[in-house]
Image (cartoon, rainbow, N blue to C red):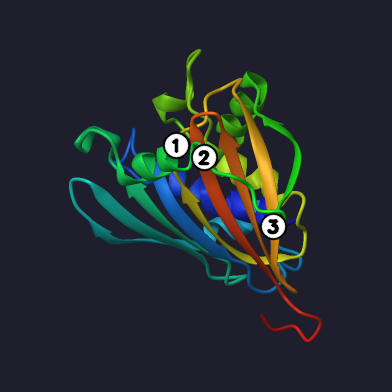
């Protein structure tokens, strides 16, 4: 399944030293060929991690699975480097957004403490911001849950805005943007949480 293959890349990212407490600002990922008979452990060992650039505020990291050619590129933001981040400012600007008629709002999106704990164990994520009563929901946990509903997803880009807290209810909004593409967003009363643009392969096998 797509989310399981993405989880393998997430586990590799969690092993990156020196960025504890940093948050995901944006990411994009794509899936290559099928894994064949390889186990998740074998696939994880075939992954390569590269820090493309890093400074006191931002870091860009790329993880590639050399077996399947799956790829994940992540922009990390050091929350301790300043006050309000650009993504938080933009998220609050969308607090009173009006939904176009072409968008479809679905059921409420809620992440429980149990779901967070399960994800942290599976992903080996030791970031302390995901623990405690006011824990921030891991960004990839939200991405993985959204991805469950789109098994044909071939690639996606995600931008994160405001953090979602444990037990906080969000609204999931979906808009079909093309024959093989759609945009999924999460909102709370505080503003936009994330925007995820998904791309599927067409019947001919090309994007």
Instruction: Name the N-terminal-most of marks 2 and 3.
Output: 3
Q: Which mark is residue 162?
A: 1
> Is there a contact, CB below 8 Å, between mark 2 and mark 3?
no
Q: Nearer the viewer, residue 118 or 97?
A: 97
From the viewer's perspective, is 33 left or right of 75?
A: right
* Residue name at image x 57 percent, y 72 percent: 69
Farthest right residue?
203
Give the secondary structure at mark 1: loop
- Between marks 2 and 3, how big is the CA–CA gap? 16 Å
> Is there a contact, CB below 8 Å, between mark 1 and mark 2?
yes
* Percent coordinates x, y for residue 126 in the rendering: 44, 30
Question: To which residue does mark 2 refer?
Answer: 193
Give the secondary structure at mark 3: strand
Question: In this rendering, which labeled residue sits more in front, label 2 or label 3?
Answer: 3
Q: Which mark is residue 77?
A: none
Q: Is residue 187 above or below residue 12?
A: above
- The answer to whether residue 113 of the structure is visible from this angle is yes
* Percent coordinates x, y for residue 8 in the rendering: 59, 52
* Count of labels in the image: 3
Question: To which residue does mark 3 refer?
Answer: 175
Circle 2 residues within 10 Å: few <14, some 14–19, many ≥20: many
* Residue name at image x 48 percent, y 17 percent: 134
* Percent coordinates x, y for residue 52 in the rendering: 30, 64
> Is there a contact, CB below 8 Å, between mark 3 and mark 1?
no
- Between marks 1 and 2, how big is the CA–CA gap? 5 Å
* Percent coordinates x, y for residue 188 in the rendering: 57, 32
Give the secondary structure at mark 2: strand
From the viewer's perspective, is 71 left or right of 16?
A: right
* Residue name at image x 55 percent, y 51 percent: 195
Instruction: Name the N-terminal-most of marks 3 and 1.
Output: 1
Circle 1 residues within 10 Å: few <14, some 14–19, many ≥20: many
Q: Is residue 40 above or below residue 36?
A: above
């Amino acid at each position: 399944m797509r989310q399981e293959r993405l989880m393998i890349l997430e586990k590799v990212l969690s092993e990156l030293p020196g960025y504890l407490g940093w948050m995901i600002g944006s990411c994009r990922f794509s899936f290559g060929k099928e894994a064949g008979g390889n186990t998740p452990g074998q696939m994880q060992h075939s992954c390569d991690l590269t820090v493309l650039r890093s400074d006191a505020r931002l870091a860009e990291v790329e993880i590639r699975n050399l077996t399947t050619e799956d790829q994940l590129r992540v922009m990390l933001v050091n929350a301790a480097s300043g006050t309000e981040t650009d993504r938080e400012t933009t998220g609050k600007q969308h607090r009173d957004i009006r939904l176009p008629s072409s968008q479809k709002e679905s059921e409420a999106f809620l992440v429980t403490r149990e779901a967070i704990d399960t994800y942290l164990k599976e992903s080996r994520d030791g970031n302390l911001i995901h623990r405690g009563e006011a824990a921030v929901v891991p960004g990839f946990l939200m991405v993985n849950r959204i991805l469950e509903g789109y098994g044909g997803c071939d690639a996606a880009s995600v931008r994160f805005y405001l953090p979602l807290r444990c037990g906080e209810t969000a609204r999931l909004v979906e808009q079909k943007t093309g024959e093989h593409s759609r945009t999924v967003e999460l909102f709370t009363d505080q503003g936009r949480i994330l925007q995820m643009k998904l791309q599927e392969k067409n019947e001919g096998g090309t994007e």
